[in-house]
């Protein structure tokens, strides 16, 4: 049932308008106060709309097909947007502790939040494409804001590759529109379910998968995405990886909605599983080889993308629940790890060989970082354990025990690399002079506050996973009920 428009569009419109305003107060002395107010305001947005389907922009249903912009809002999407806004708020709060906080940085964060929210909500492919491209621009801008030569190189490479990937995504959307006569995803799904496939439809599916891989960091775009994370400031990288995880979920769910259960999707399903496994294994192997803490975390971000994609690619209700749940968990513990890296880097370096002895200097921070490391490794009672357990169960239920074994092995590799990094940062002996240097270097309380919030959530969702699962389950059951692998 289609309802009239309510306040739901403000989830997208409000951050966009505020992004424009912040861009004009670039060097204002009140930027920190305004950023704090903005961070608090973001937390209200996910609760403005009621569940249902919406269309707006002076369009409606024409000839039995939805014309114009359409949004679908449910408990699963509300939860994803809430986590997205929460991390955006914490990044803004962390940024308040930076000496060079400016309106452009806040504007880019807000523009990214609005765009990812639109991709999550949208039920028409062109709207998804428009905001998908904005997210790519935002990510490039946030990397360039680091101001280093390597950041400029990484941003340029990401944008160059994005021009190709974005063009292919738009071409795929054009293919699907020409074959089905509509851009609305629900209407397109009805057409594809009742008509035979054509080469144009095959091409559209392929282009959607390419766009998915670029937006999320799946192979073959994994190294480009990892470089972007590594070159950005660590607390900014927490936002970048959150954007990517929810872009992955949103586009993968669109692909499942359009093609899930159709016979010709079987081959594509196998490709998605293969890409997921490669991302998992490649990410953890590369992380084990790193001596730079930011690069280590960046490759683990790629590895965790593989987990999320694998769960969603399985396509069963349990697989979708596990995939979305792990995306939410990953956004939390990975953001905590990047914020922890931001705090550690303030003490002098991100090079693991140059660190050590930080435990007595900041024991509370060490404990919170350890919690995040255990969460990403899948150790109970943290949230990562709950979602990884569901992922393994989903793989076993579709008779793919080898996928479950790979997930377990990758988790072991993750644990090894994380504990190695923890030792080098906090436990490795160092001189008394170095410890005194650490003590004389102040760390922003804003960063510690943000890290504490994320740590609490990692524990909370590990102990009470049903808080998330119960909100995801209805949508997952709807998408996966006709897509059961044999």
Image (tube, rainbow, N blue to C red):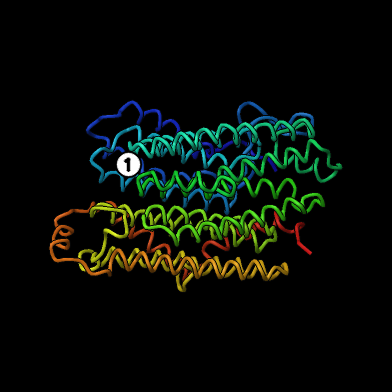
Query: In the depicted view, which residue is nearer to us: 389 or 45?
Result: 389
Q: Is residue 395 left or right of residue 369?
A: right
Q: Quadrant of residue 323?
A: bottom right
Is 14 rendered above or below residue 429? Answer: above
Measured from the top left, where is residue 441 in percent x and y?
Answer: 17, 54
Residue visible at 35% across and 49% down in the picture: 235
* Quarter of the rendering occupied by the N terminus: top right
Q: Is residue 233 left or right of residue 15?
A: left
Measured from the top left, where is residue 232 in percent x and y?
Answer: 38, 44
Is 37 rendered above or below residue 323? Answer: above
Q: Quadrant of residue 154?
A: top left
Measured from the top left, where is residue 66 in percent x and y?
Answer: 72, 34
Is 43 rendered above or below residue 411? Answer: above
Question: Which residue has dot 1 on it?
Answer: 37
Query: In the depicted view, which residue is nearer to us: 46 or 332?
Result: 332
* Quarter of the rendering occupied by the C terminus: bottom right
Residue visible at 39% across and 35% down in the picture: 152
**Residue that extends furthest to the bottom in the rendered view of this protein:** 380
């Amino acid at each position: 049932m289609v309802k009239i428009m309510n306040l739901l569009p403000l989830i997208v419109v409000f951050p966009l308008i505020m992004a424009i305003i912040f861009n004009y107060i670039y060097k204002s002395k009140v930027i920190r106060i305004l950023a704090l107010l903005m961070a608090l305001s973001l937390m209200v947005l996910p609760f403005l709309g009621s569940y249902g389907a919406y269309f707006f922009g002076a369009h409606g249903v024409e000839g039995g097909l939805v014309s114009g912009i359409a949004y679908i809002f449910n408990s699963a999407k509300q939860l994803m947007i809430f986590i997205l806004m929460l991390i955006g708020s914490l990044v803004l709060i962390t940024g308040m502790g930076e000496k060079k906080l400016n309106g452009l940085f806040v504007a880019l964060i807000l523009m990214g939040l609005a765009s990812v929210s639109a991709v999550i909500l949208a039920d028409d492919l062109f709207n998804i494409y428009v905001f998908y491209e904005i997210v790519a621009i935002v990510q490039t801008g946030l990397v360039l804001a680091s101001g280093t030569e390597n950041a400029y190189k990484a941003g340029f490479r990401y944008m160059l590759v994005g021009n190709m990937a974005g063009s292919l995504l738009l071409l795929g959307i054009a293919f699907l529109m020409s074959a089905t006569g509509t851009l609305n995803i629900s209407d397109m799904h009805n057409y594809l379910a009742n008509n035979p496939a054509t080469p144009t439809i095959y091409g559209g599916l392929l282009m959607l998968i390419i766009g998915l891989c670029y937006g999320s960091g799946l192979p073959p775009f994994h190294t480009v995405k990892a470089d972007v994370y590594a070159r950005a400031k660590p607390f900014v990288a927490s936002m970048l990886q959150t954007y990517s995880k929810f872009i992955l979920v949103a586009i993968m769910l669109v692909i499942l909605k359009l093609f899930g259960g159709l016979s010709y999707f079987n081959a594509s399903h196998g490709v998605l599983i293969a890409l997921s496994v490669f991302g998992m294994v490649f990410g953890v192997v590369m992380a084990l080889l790193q001596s730079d803490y930011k690069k280590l975390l960046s490759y683990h971000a790629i590895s965790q993308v593989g987990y999320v994609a694998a769960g969603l690619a399985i396509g069963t209700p349990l697989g979708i629940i596990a995939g979305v749940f792990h995306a939410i968990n990953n956004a939390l513990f990975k953001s905590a790890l990047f914020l922890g890296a931001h705090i550690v880097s303030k003490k002098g370096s991100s090079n693991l060989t140059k660190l050590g002895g930080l435990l007595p200097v900041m024991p509370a921070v060490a404990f919170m970082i350890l919690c995040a490391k255990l969460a990403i490794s899948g150790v109970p009672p943290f949230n990562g354990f709950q979602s990884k357990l569901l992922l393994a169960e989903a793989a076993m239920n579709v008779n793919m025990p080898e996928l479950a074994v790979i997930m377990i092995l990758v988790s072991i590799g993750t644990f090894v690399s994380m504990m190695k990094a923890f030792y080098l940062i906090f436990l490795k002996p160092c001189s008394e002079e170095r410890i005194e240097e650490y003590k004389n270097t102040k760390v922003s309380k804003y960063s510690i506050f943000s890290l504490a919030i994320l740590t609490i959530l990692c524990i909370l969702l590990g102990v009470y996973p049903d808080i998330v699962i119960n909100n995801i389950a209805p949508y997952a059951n709807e998408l996966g009920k006709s897509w059961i692998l044999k």
